[in-house]
Amino acid sequence: MTSKVKDNVNQSSFTEGFCIDKASYPEDDFILFKIFKSAFQFGQEKMLTTRVLFAVCLVAACRVDGYTLKEEDEPFHQDVFGTDFLRQPLHPPFICLDMTPSPSVPTSVEYVKAADIKVIAALGDSLTTAIGANGSTILSIPFEFRHVSWSIGGYGTYQNVITLANIFKLFSPELLGPSPVRMLHGQPATVNETGFNFAVTGHNTLNVSDQIRHMIDTFKSYPGLNFEEDWKVVTMMIGMNDICDYCKDKTLFSPDRFTHHMTEALDMMMKEIPRTIVNVVQIFPMKPLRDVQRPTLGCQLQKSFCSCLVQPEENSPDLKELVEVNYEFQRRLEKLLHGERFFKKDFAVVLQPYLEKAVPPTLPDGTIDLSFFTADCFHFTVKGHEELAKGLWNNMFQANGEKDKIKSFSEPIKLICPTKEHPYIYTRPRVVSSAPKHSSVVLTMFLISGFHYL
């Protein structure tokens, strides 16, 4: 499928569901919402221009119905410019007994310690670009807070914000790839701004091979990166947009096409990137996101980000079909990554299943804890990203068949350390066979033969 066709799919998904009742919201909010809406209603080039002008207007000073938004306005400064998590208390230090690298660079993917990792990268969609993650109003949604993204964010240290990259930095301080800054969605950026976060907001599984090609080309040319010798961790989470777009094209976004594109993408990495561990994070059940609601304009964006999930009536055939497709994606991914299909001496793909059964976190009274969700009621705040990071780290140091599956993030996840018995990232596939082991057959035949001659 061409990128032009894909852009049309994404553009239509952004502009759906923007019908709101003006009387239901304050005049200021309604005007801001109309400004924000316009950023998604132009063609690809005009869309970028409008978004940039929108951001510049907000940064410099923009009069909206008699009120001037200025950079020094504290609520806006926190929402868009990312200072709120700086004011949080520092996280306690995370210290393990063994945080040292192997005596020599490992040659086997089965014996790679956290401190042996030299490069970190990420692939995916808006959950990995961290849309709106450090904001609390609709004004933050056009921004990608990549520097706090769960799998690749590199802001500050682990004590400032918990991301997979910041955890790895405790073991490997010279780690290459963490994302250093936030960005405006759609704005051209260099690798110095994105780090090795190759995710693209709005991408479906059909686009992920393009991300991988970009990643490979970057790895080969990046100063200080030894493509052949350095051990790399790549985290990949994609497929949710396929589910969000399923009702628009049930063939293009079918489980069969999902499996095809995932296989193609993983084959490319296994063939072309040496010394790499790939985390494939299982897709979570998406239906519970329908219950994440606030009486705000921002939540109206759910209808544009994921109309196939949000718009069907409860218990409707369309919703039931989508839920089954969601589960089928999970089953297909588990089947694809079961066994040694994507495992060799210096490369492994590992399914990390911790989100397989996850539902939105709740408060003691049973209501959804909205502090985990951005103003659009769909993406995760920094608080949510930190729990995603911790869950992934723990899965990496749990054996296949023994990995945690989080029910909810209501209780903060406690990080684990690599064990003394197995200080390595778990990469060996779990292969279960119903056939008798060859050694058992040989032993049985030997005993029969032996008794015959006695």
Image (cartoon, grey):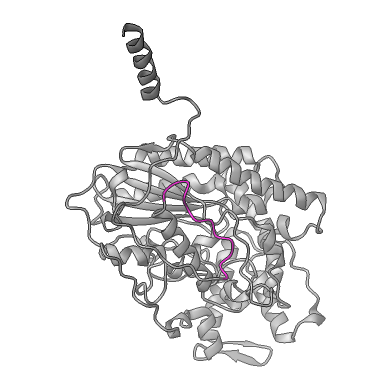
Percent position (x, y) of residue 433? 48, 30
Does the magenta portion include 416?
no
Does 298 sit left or right of 390 as displayed?
A: right
Task: Examine the image and state in which quarter residue 436 appears.
Answer: top left
Q: Position of residue 232 (x, y in %)?
A: 33, 51
Looking at the figure, which quarter contains the C terminus?
A: top left
Number of callouts? 0
Q: Main secondary structure of the magenta part?
A: loop
Image position, residue 199 (x, y; %):
48, 56
Q: Is residue 64 above or below residue 104?
A: below
Q: Can you say whether 204 is above or below 271 in the image?
A: below
Establish if 425 lies above or below 262. below
Q: Residue 212, percent across and down?
A: 43, 47
Q: Nearer the viewer, residue 357 or 452?
A: 452
Q: Is residue 272 above or below residue 169?
A: above
The residue closer to the viewer here, 303 or 109, is: 109
Numbered range of the magenta stretch: 399-410
Q: Is residue 222 visible?
A: no
The residue at the point 54 percent across, 72 percent down is: 381
User: Residue, x 46% and y 50% (percent of image)?
Assistant: 402
Q: Is residue 245 left or right of residue 89?
A: right
* Residue drawn at point x = 31 percent, y = 51 percent: 422
Q: Residue furthest top?
A: 453
Q: Is residue 293 visible?
A: yes
